[in-house]
Amino acid sequence: MRTTRRGFLALSGAASVAAALRLDAAPALAQAGPVKIGVLAAKAGVLAPVGESGMRGVQWATDRINATGGILGRKIELVIEEESSPKDTVERFRKLALQDKVDVISGAISTGVGLALGPVAEEMQTIWLAWDATTQKGVEESMPKPKYSFRSTDNECEAVMASILTARSWKGKFRTVAGINPDYSYGRDNWAAFLAIMKKSGIEVQVVSELWPKLGATDFTAHVAALQQAKPDLIFSCFWAGDTPIFMKQAHAAGLTQSTKLVMTTGGGVHESLKKAFTPEGALLGYNCMYFEHPKASPLMKEFVRWHQEKFKEWPNYESDHGYFTVVAYKAAVERAAKAAGGKWPSIDQVIQALEGVEVESLSGSRRYREDHIMEATFFQGFTTHKNKHDFVTIDPLESMGTKQIQKPSGVGLYDWINSWKV
Amino acid sequence: MLGGVFHAAVLFLVAAGLQLVFGVQRILNLACGSFYALGAYFGVSAVTWALGAGLPAPLFVVVLLGAGLALAAIGPPLERLLRTIYDRDESFQLLLTFALVLMFEDVIRFFWGTAPYQLGQAYLIYGQWRIGGSVVPVYNLVVIAAGGLIALGMGWFLARSRFGRIVRATAENREMSEALGVDMTRVYARVFTLGVALGTVGGALVIPATAATNEMGIELIVEAFAVVVIGGLGSMRGAFAGALIVGLMKASAIAIYPEVEMLAVYVVVIAVLVLRPSGLFARATA
């Protein structure tokens, strides 16, 4: 389970064998020493499993890149710090930039932290490539034109995709809805987006219950009882952490999952904990931007999944892909900028310019940074099935949607954008 | 309302551990939440192992209870550590027991990692009952019954048994009991271990219905303190009534107006603090 640095290093040997197939011989440059990448990974609390998953993606990318000669001949060295509260994480960001003098900082999951890091990245003039953190205040982008901050996909992408799929598959089959979502901006905004899209899709719904358990709560028996009373046709939830299986188990035990339609926008992040014993078939389940058992997975993805399974005895989730993407995107940007600069190691400004619009092959497929520094990726959702070799649910058929379809465009408000859809 | 009672049963066990240790040893033990979390993790591992070793599935509750009790073995060494601060300022107690909370969180991370741990099938082994139009898992009733039985047992133990009398005497007047020949070191070690056991059994019992997460202890400490303030510090009956009040307040808030879930609980806490500062079941003597 535990991922130690030493364990990773031991593994890099194995990874190098596979990676040796690809030889992008880089010109030996006069630049001395390794490229330092600072990493901010959560290690405690509800975020810990997600932080670890992101870290695995970063480490795997780093091992592969180092095994094939590094970035323009310079090896990558990781300096790992912890993501915790916004205040402490800001201090560690400063430490990485000032004391460790890293070239770039990758990491951060929580948007609470992201909001604090955004301005600091600008102030420290250090490139920050977020995994999952945005700089959104609610659904509004707080930093429309940053220079050094590169943010994740919007917080509402999953809710938008799940709502579109709900409307497409279940229109006319439900009327009363209930929401149970974690009590912070993510939960509230996703629920609001869902209702807005229902309205836009011409589906008249009646909200019979809105529940807001605290993030990290572990007892939902009272919430489940309230849902039993409300008897909704459909339950919408954007639980994404350890609360997901707990809710599912308690809801199932109360007989809530048999007749009620379930929309779990983000539960795929903890997919292995959604055991068949208590997770029904036919629920809509979202995996964010990577699905570990993609029927048409790329060789890269297959290799990562195999490595991850062998090493950790777990099937990877999407955060690994965020982590992986930040490292390979940085490499691609440096190489692109160096080419433009005549082979010299590029300046920070040149790297930033090259990161804008950079497109690389990530684990889940092609991903890029938009010109306003927001990630573009493909999201995966589908209806749960028990027909697989695991003891947990998977989805079939797999639905995928690109951020071009489910993410608000640059500079447009979420609800204005939804209202502008042609349905 | 059964949801609220279920939560109350678990809350009672943790708060009872807190009360017992405070009542006798005058230690405000923040780590009671950690015992709960440890009990949960240990319970999952024990049951997983026992099922793997061929245990008939319906007996898993016995394993959980056993695991909770066995884990209470960490009681005596911890009590030995706390002995250094019995006669010092309360702030040292809070510091030390909070340090224990953080250390146990790391212990859990070390042994079990950061991903949530759960027992997949166990929760529904006893089936579900239909009570007044809603379906209730029988296991919830088992936990409620266990909480009630333990409360009765504690009541009997404190009021009737010989050791219970010594415990009460010690809580009333430590010097006097010592003068009468009570071996304080042993009483403290036992009482503390019993306090630990209440927490670990609570954690072990709740786990089939939920999943073990690193921060589950901290979450419960805060609520246990609300229970203690409502019920009165150091009182067993207070823990029982306080846990019921908190559990039912939360459940009815969620059913009627979910926005005030936590607010409702703390309104009661404030009302008690203002109207009856020593709690509903405060002891007559200090």
Image (cartoon, rainbow, N blue to C red):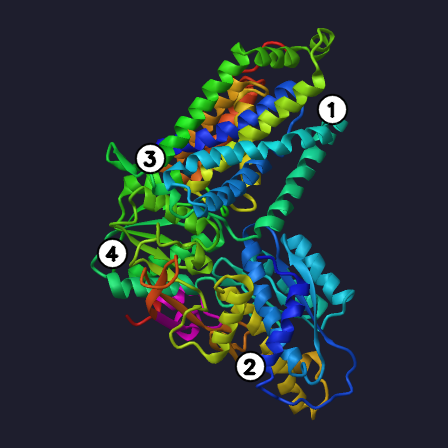
How many numbered tags mark residues here?
Answer: 4
Q: Residue at x 51, y 75 (%)?
A: A303
> Is label 3 or label 4 in front?
3
Report, in whole angstroms, how far the alpha carbon at label 2 lies from the one at label 3: 56 Å
Q: Name the residue at 77% across, 66% down.
A: A98
- Mark 2 or 4, closer to the camera: 2
Which amino acid type is shown beneath numbered disc 2? Val
Query: Mark 2 or mark 4: which comes first in sequence?
Result: 4
User: Which residue occupies the foreground of this view, A51 or B280?
Assistant: A51
Could you tell me which chain the residue with mark 1 belongs to? B
- Circle 2 SS class: loop
**Mark 3 vs mark 1: which is more N-terminal?**
1
Identify which amino acid the numbered label 3 is placed on.
Val
How far apart, in angstroms, are the residues tagged by discs 2 and 4?
Answer: 42 Å
Q: What is the crowding at mark 2: few (fewer than 14 residues within 10 Å), some, or many (at least 20)? A: some
Q: Do marks 1 and 4 share a subunit?
A: no
Q: Secondary structure at mark 3?
A: helix
User: Percent position (x, y) of residue A397?
Assistant: 31, 69
Q: Chain of mark 3?
A: B
Asked if labels 2 and 4 share a chain, the reply is yes
Location of mark 2 (residue): A358
Residue located beneath label 4 in the image: A204
Q: Position of residue A86 (x, y in %)?
A: 63, 54
Q: Which residue is mark 3?
A: B138
* Chain identifier of the residue bearing label 4 in the image: A
Badge 3 and badge 4 in a common chain: no
Residue A410 lies in magenta, yes or no? yes
